[in-house]
Amino acid sequence: MKTRSSTSLTRRRLLQSAVVAGATLPVRSTAAAGSSASGSTLALGARSSSQDGRSQVVIGAWAEPATLLSGAPVTGASYQQIQRVIANGLVKLGYPSFEVEPDLAESWETSEDHLTHTFTLRSGVTWHDGEPFTAEDVKFTYDLVTAKEWPGGLDSYFAQIAGATEHKAGEADQLTGVEVIDDTHVKVTLVQPDALFLASAASRQRILPKHVLESIPVADIDKSDFARKPIYTGAYIVEEWKQGESLTLRANPDYFGGAPAIETVISRFIPDPATTYAELSSGGLDIGTVSPDLLSTFENDSAYTVRELPGLRVIFLHFDLTLPLFSDSRVRKAIRHAVDKQTVIDALLLGKGEVGRSFITPLAWIFNPDAPDYPYDPKQAANLLDEAGWTLGDDGVRVNADGERLAFTLTVPTAWREDGLAVQPFLQAVGFEVTIEEQGAGQSTGPLQVGEYQAAVNGWNNYIIDPRADLQRWFQNPRPADQTGYKNDEVDALFLKARAALDKEEEKSLYFQIQELVETDAPLAYLWREQDLLVVGPRLTVPETDTLSELYDRIPEWRLND
């Protein structure tokens, strides 16, 4: 259930304030030392072993996913992180380069015309239930996720496979572009060269078990038990999912990459940073991220290891562009100009972040630093709103010629409550009336879709999927899940050209053009990128990594200290 939230924070916190736009901004904060938030489950503990004697680690860094079904149209960062340790694709993206590496396929060959990819699969791989993995599972998987009955539209990742469009339209019984040669070889044929095929469809789609799913109607698979307790081939097996509480993973002793060192990994769903802080302090968690105001608590304790990692998650506002208010790009651009992002970073994040100006990280090779930007400029925001026909009223709220107020509801997940509260006064200062509606903890319904909201605070983690795919997921049509209603035919055409480009510099130039057009349209309002402030407890040793995403990808390498 969604609940209304006032503009003041009610939980106990350490406060540091900056007076901005006539309002007080809260610092991103956890509870004061020694306190715990309501709902904290300290009794779980970060024991070195579970009750059955298995070695155990407790993580407090993941949100609750909507599903564990690979290929589902509704996903998110937590889903992607978990998938990487429980499931496998034909290939994978390696860190930190994000180059394509072998996974279930130990090698592959690409034809001279770049239309055919022939994969040689690993021998001896078994599913979590002990059944053998074969090329039939690969064929079944791609048939399944391009089937007419599969929920959502045809993902652009798969649209380049020969026969995918016909299969999704119900004009063919199977996907003609995926062919089984023998148990360890499979051939994929494309309709045109696709520079992104290996880094998207072949890596992001994990292979599904034919012997488990072939008896379930396609339309029912996303609602089946498999979506919550799947069988894959990865390093960890899903043992238990307690809704709103935790996900327990058990090491796969038969994993083809070698059995993980830690036998049990419990990921606790903790959207409230106060609980994370309390649990790290008490030993209820072995590892987690904390808010900037309490980082020094752990920095000053030699028992803990602290790492400040680049902020790969961009926090942003997205809008239902099918609504009359947000269909006007001048209104969206006014919102981008209205928010003093650096002041919020200094006050809310204590400077541990950077201004958001793109959907992809500036670390990405396709990032366009010259794409249109909308720096803090309240006068320009006011001018844009005037131009759009919104006149400032006596009560400070703008109205149009029909007497409609410039008002909307901003949906804010609990994890980004402070971000929503920080934005609100800036928007009010230029004439918006903003009501915050909190999407509370434990609501794992997946991302909001067009027609379900007006505007929302959201976050997107980069360096989990290829940065080209990041752009596709939000700006190319068609897409399996539509959170904004954004459509630009010129952008769609450039995406197709970029996919077909075989020269990397040509491809980069096309993605630069895509960003130029998208940011001219301004369908999203980027806010900031908060650094990932990682705290590792005294029992645990984890590898040195450049990003938090890579750290979680390497969970099988984590070790408990003696």
Image (cartoon, rainbow, N blue to C red):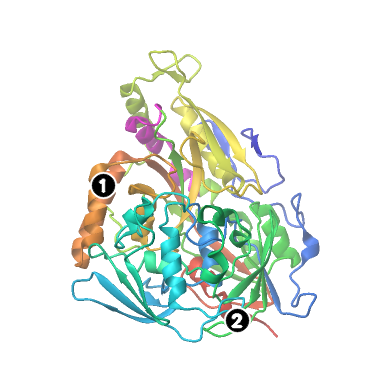
Question: How far, Cα to Cα, is label 2 from label 1?
Answer: 44 Å
Is residue 245 shown above or below 129? above
Identified at 49% across, 50% down, the residue is 459
Q: For this rendering, which residue is in front, 237 or 515? A: 237
Figure disc tally? 2
Task: Give the quarter of the figure containing the N terminus.
Answer: top right
Task: Give the quarter of the figure containing the C terminus.
Answer: bottom right
Q: Based on the displayed image, in which of its 4 quarters is residue 49 positioned?
A: bottom right
Q: For this rendering, which residue is in front, 210 or 155? A: 210
Question: Label 1 amino acid?
Answer: Val
Is residue 402 shown above or below 29? above
Magenta-drawn stretch, dominant element (helix, strand or loop) = helix
Disc 2 marks which residue? 260
Circle 1: element type? helix
Identified at 47% across, 28% down, the residue is 429
Would residue 175 be seen by someone viewing this image from the given angle? yes
Q: Position of residue 236 (x, y in %)?
A: 60, 74
Disc 1 marks which residue? 491
Identified at 48% across, 20% down, the residue is 396
Span shown in magenta: 324-345
Identified at 65% across, 62% down, the residue is 60
Circle 2: element type? loop
